[in-house]
Amino acid sequence: MADTALTAPLRSPLSQVAARLAAATRTSRGAIRLAEVPFLAQINVRLDVKGAAADAIGLALGLQLPLEPDTVVRAGELTVLWLGPDEWLVAGPTGSERDLERRIREAAGDEPVSVTDVSAQRTTLLVTGPRARDLLAHGCALDLHPRAFGSGRCAQTTLGRAQVVLVARDEPRAGFWVLVRSSFAGYLADWLLDAATEYV
């Protein structure tokens, strides 16, 4: 009997290139590490930052929504990215999307808030290593120097002609998250592998 959408196991958008990503990591001798962080919970939130919902949602999540453009706030396993003056992306561990969505909706109450589960829309590539910035700079127009795009920063940009959300992780040597639409994930993985050839 064929698997249906309800019974089939989850399959990551990059499952077919996982071995190639791992091989590039091995042959780069630590200069570059490429991996997928599949099934990250992602909730898009839009609201008036001056309304009561912003503080209530912050309390429900255990952190305040970042108000400075292109910044990231972390608390425990949650990461909140500033995407615009009235838009944030809440990222959490795999399988937490329903709980996050419920907590945000309950905290918002009757306030006008848009809460959308976009977990299936994107996958996340992890790019780390001493040459991670150099690799990303091959196809990104942003100034990725640590003074301009240091830890705790994020931006909606293009990488190798694919629209992405780029996040400079805040842990030491944690590198970058590259959030990319699932339909472009294979293309972007191929682009990264090709761009990384000078480091392997």
Image (cartoon, helix red, strand yellow):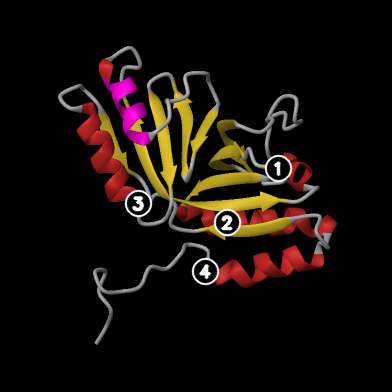
Q: Earlier in the sequence, mark 3 or mark 2?
A: 3
Q: Earlier in the sequence, mark 1 or mark 2?
A: 1
Considering the whole magenta stretch, tell me its main secondary structure: helix
**Label 4 packing within 10 angstroms: few (<14), some (14-19), many (20+):** few
- Give percent across and percent down for residue 151: 66, 33
> For the magenta stretch, what is the residue range?
53-61
Report the residue marked by disc 3. 96
What amino acid type is highlighted by mark number 1?
Pro
Report the residue marked by disc 2. 187
SS assignment at label 4: helix
| 56 in relation to 131, above or below | above
- Give percent across and percent down for residue 175: 68, 45
Q: Nearer the viewer, residue 96 or 194?
A: 96
Q: Residue at x 74, y 65 (%)?
A: 24
Q: Residue at x 80, y 47 (%)?
A: 131
SS assignment at label 3: loop
